[in-house]
Image: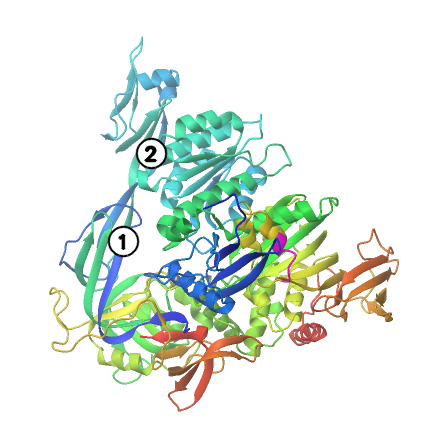
Amino acid sequence: MDYTQPPQVVLGLDLGAVTTRASLFGLESGKYRLLGQAAVPTSLGAGRHLGEGVGDAVLALQESTGRKLLNEDGSLIQPFTATGDGLDRIVLASDAGPRLRTVVLGMSEGGSVAAGRAWAASLPLDLQGAYGVQDLARTPDLLDRLVAARPELILITGGEDGGNSETVAAWIEMVRTLCLLLPQEIRPELIFAGNPSQHEAVHRRLEPYTRVAIVPNLQPLAGTLDLAPAQTAADEIICRRWQASFAGWRDLMRIAGGQAATLDLGLNRMLRFLSRTSTLSQEDRGVAAVDLGGGQTRLALGWQGKALLLAEPARPEPFDGFDPQNYAEMRRWLAEELDDAVLRTYLWIRAVHPAVVPITAEENAIEQALGHAHLRRASRKLAAHYPQAPIDAEQGLTAHFEPVIASGELLTGAPYAGKPVLMLLDGLQPGGVTTLVLDRYHLLPLLGAAAPGLAVLPVHLLETDAFQNLGTVIVPRSTAPAGEPILTVAVQKEDGVHFEVEITQATLKRVVIQVNEPAVLVLRPDPRTDVGFGGPGIGGRLKVTGGALGVVIDARGRPIPLPEDEEARVALIQRWQWMLGG
Amino acid sequence: MAKMVKVLQASPHTIIQRIRRLPLAGRVLVAMGDPVRPTDVIAEAVLPAGVLTLDVGRGLGVSPQEADACALRRPGEKVKAGDLLAQCEGTLTRAVRAPADGTLVDYSRGKAILSTQELKISVQAGMPGVVEDIFPEFGAKLRVEGGLVQGEWGNDGCAEGPLQVLEGLDLDAENVTLAAGEILALPEVTEPSVFETVRAADLAGLVTFWLAPALLAQAAACAFPVLVISGLGAGAADPRAWDWLQASRGKLSGLNAGGGADPAEQRPELIVPGEGTTPDKGASPDKGVAPVEALGLQAALALGQRVRILTGAAAGQVGKVSRLEEPLMFESGFAYSTATIDLADGRQVQVPQRNLVILG
């Protein structure tokens, strides 16, 4: 492969648990753009091979773009030819492979162990246990547990740079013992992200028994957190191990020349990038991304140059008889009055058949409520993993995040823009002023996977209409009682049309501005109301470009209050849906 | 392009082959041609457990380096309780003995690691049949010719017993008797008392087409295997599967309620071997009748296939695919590729192809 010339055509393969997407990017007038995308069911299951789904997707892509990508024998045409056939490069990303059984060994529960948990939650890993210094006293029992867990990956962390090293040294010895207890073929790989004073001990005591990756400390100083190097190391291990356990991955890795990553790491990279580029001058602003796919829920914040990400399987846990808190939460967001049997039956089918789709209004209401519940739960978990992050379990996003980028079939497949907008507002509860953007082709994680080899691809693609502006959202926060006026919005359009909208507390309102139409909004909050311009009562001018829904003003309060009475609650949710065009 | 969708087998006569593998190398306990029963362990691996860390240096009153020089045993050696592990000569001879029977795993830095127990990881046959192939150190491929019905969900575990098939569990009704060790099949389970009846009668397992949603947690917690063929809710039993179950009444059957949650794994299933296939080696159940070729775990939808509808107004109903069509907008506002299904009552419904299960 010639890496001295920019590739003319790049094929991106996103292999989700439910859907395989093949995206074709081409260089036109010096900029990359999306030439086409095809989506087919992922070919998972006993006796199947990922290549089957990829083959179907590339065939469909060939048909929809009119570009010849495959030779007669079914192989890809590489490199791109003078006649316009084929492609130069392939980028591969997935989250559908087996989740590695993982153990975290750290020091303090609130420090390095918590950091290790956050690391594990940001990748397709199956965390079997996270242990701290207090667990070392239970060594025999713990060793038995570790043997029974048969971890494939262990992270040792803890001890700031130059700080305590005894606990980490004890964990090194325990991992060595574990390696001696387990047969060689199932010994765990190790990532060491702890006190650097122990690097030599890691080499000497552990390298004879297993593969070791040494990366910078997760917490080099008290109050600092840097998960990125350990995430990258884990991602390499995951992608390598999938070659043996994820049918077809090895072949795809080979044709992609090793340019592969998990979708989680791809999204992580993009959020770091966006945080550094779009909010560099403003320490109190960030970017957010949400992915509500059939197989995964991801919530990621780009904040102060770092990515805080939570990824978890999207299945609604039917086999434990439904978690009561999650179930109650989801029930509260239903826009239909449904009895428990109907609800539980549909949820169960969704869990057993993740590819199933809603066809009735009731099923659609359940999917919407499920999306709300997933987002709320992800918000709570993210807040727990990153106590320093501006996200509150109940209040939602407590700082300004712009844009909020949304993807996943539940959001992108909706028949009108109001559905994803309402789901994002209810699930994330953003504050201040933000823009909601729909990643219609689920490109963001794939672009992150492509970034190391082709850094301009994400830069160019982010400027295209593959990312659809859903609308600008203004969230006034006010201490006024429900029903009282709190804000006046004067709208000045370029065509000379001027009008004013009065916003009352506890309402949701839409201001119609046509798609791509520029306008200036003059916000005049009352003294009790903060619109994010520097404090209560402070207003200002805001330049906007019309999105699919124009401008949405969410004055419902935080947390968004819902009536206890089911009939009233359903009526209110339906009113909000109607307000946004549903 | 027709969708690949999940397949659930419901066949009165087919060749059933299943691979059973350990997750790590161990010992295979069966040989080619051996007959097996569902609960038979066909392979097992052993991992060390009951791990003890002995501070030999402290026991000897010497430094870790000196303790290492006093070792009398090497890693890998079996020891008995009371055996000397280390001893150092001095003014007073001091020694450290094994506190229990076990294996010395490691001896370094003045510490000895002793494994005193074993953790067995095993794989069961999960079906009646014969061993068709051996995977050295890992497991075997099993085979049987007979009938089977696969389900959407199982609560784990496996069992074997004569099949009892009842329309309902009215024990006061005439001719309804339950015998210990039987596997009971019912069209639906709507009352928790069914689980208690199965337990009290010491039945081997329970098979039902439909399970009331509120009973899922109880079914999951049952100590006996439970297989749900069609899903949660209520409805009619798939007539083909029901007829086959009735025809199999009294026959020895194997119930494997493991799997089901992961499409990549096995399906929970009930297998009734043909006459003479177990324990005799490989005899055919129906001489002269060719078995139906089994579909895989997934298959492409095709015209004429029997399917069950998963959601919508016709959820739970069984029908045949009569057309495969382009995307259609549904009431939900979403558009999907559809299939037209001919239902048993003569009606036709259009359903997203993704919302179907093939009944193979």
Answer with the quarter of the image where residue A422 lies.
bottom right
Expressed as whole percent of the image width and height from the top left, the position of residue B306 reads 34, 80
Magenta span of residues: A460-465
Q: Nearer the viewer, residue A376 or A522?
A: A522
Measured from the top left, where is residue B260 in percent x and y?
37, 64
Kindly state the secondary structure of the residue where label 1 is placed.
Answer: strand
Q: Residue furthest top?
A: B91
Q: Is residue B9 above or below residue A27?
A: below
Closest to the observer, A402 or A180: A402
Q: Which mark is residue B232?
A: none
Mark 1 is on which residue type? Answer: Arg
Q: In the displayed structure, does residue B323 sit left or right of residue A470?
A: left
When the figure is inspected, residue B16 is found, relative to residue A269, above or below; the finding is below
Residue at the outermost bottom position: B346
Q: Which residue is mark 1?
A: B21
> Which quadrant is the C terminus of chain A positioned in?
bottom right
